[in-house]
Image (cartoon, rainbow, N blue to C red):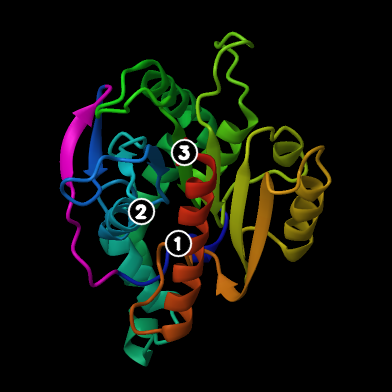
Amino acid sequence: MSCPDCYRGGVTTEHPKGKETTIHGLATYVAEPPAGTTPKDIILYITDAFGWQHANNRVLADHYASRGGYLVYVPDFMGGHAIDAYGLVVMDKVAGKAATWADTFWKPWYIARMVPSIISFMWFCRPAVRKGLVYEFAQKLRSSPAPYQTNGKPLRIGAAGFCWGGKFGVWLAQDEPASRLAEAQPLVDCVFTAHPSFLSVPADIEAVTLPLSVAVGEDDMALPADKIQQMKKMLEAKPGAEGRYEVNIIPGAKHGFAVRSHPNDAHEMECALRAEDQAIAWFDKWLARD
């Protein structure tokens, strides 16, 4: 994985409100808009290293559903190889700003507990290994009837990717799966990503063609400041870029801020809310249209 901040952070105090089911062959968490509300469209949520079962990812998906009115799918793209949930708390004890002398003393034991889970994740969840599964799921979403009444409107699909999932979000924004005919409809209509990991700048950004919104912290350990600025300049220089691409750099935010903020840290929570607002506004712009 790209940096220590990929493994640490806070745990939400909220409780997920969605349901688990199987969609297109994958275990999936489903977050729905308020009862009696027809979904605007579908958001494909691609998680960070802690996977589809972690409360942080499920609660954020719930927010997109309740605040934005979207139907949100959080599939298990990791095949059960997500980092164990306890790893978030363990790493926070080791590297967090509130680590005590006892946490430091027990650091070797904490790390030893995490090593098997991290190794499993890093081996089985390499982006190149999971790319085909993500594309296949998106293709099935695109080619299947909407699971709700659209009243004649075309089904639109947005993708939201975080950390590990951010790489896939950028790939989807390139719209270049080799198995698809060039004249076919894009797999997704727009993408939002927060603090993407494994990103290759400039190569990944050069290939972007679909609307892409990026939220990144100015202190992101996974993406150096010069790469952030390069990405921003590249997207803004693309033909027809105005309103189609955006990179918002959040002051004082670190890697993982959109999904792993500490509930008792006002600044971190404010940064997370800014990313959430950005995502919902982006989806409303590109999905919820007549």
Residue 19: x %, y % from top left: 15, 44
Q: Secondary structure at mark 2?
A: helix
Residue drawn where x is 48% and y is 47% of the image: 283
Q: Assess whether residue 15 is covered by the magenta stretch.
A: yes
Circle 3 packing at 10 Å, graded few (<14), some (14-19), many (20+), is many
- Under mark 1, the amino acid is Glu
Q: Which residue is mark 1?
A: 276
Q: Earlier in the sequence, mark 3 or mark 1?
A: 3
- Under mark 3, the amino acid is Gly
Q: Of the numbered discs in the image, which one, if any, rests on residue 243?
A: none
Looking at the image, residue 26 sits to the left or right of residue 271; the answer is left
Residue 46: x %, y % from top left: 42, 43
Q: Which residue is mark 3?
A: 158
Establish if 47 lies above or below 143. Answer: below
Instruction: Please say if the residues under marks 1 and 2 sit with CB atoms less than 8 Å apart.
Output: yes
Q: Identify which residue, 6 or 261, lies in the foreground.
A: 261
Q: Earlier in the sequence, mark 1 or mark 2?
A: 2
Residue drawn where x is 34% and y is 62% of the image: 112
Quadrant of the rendered image containing residue 55: bottom left
Residue drawn where x is 32% and y is 26% of the image: 151
Q: Which residue is mark 2?
A: 64
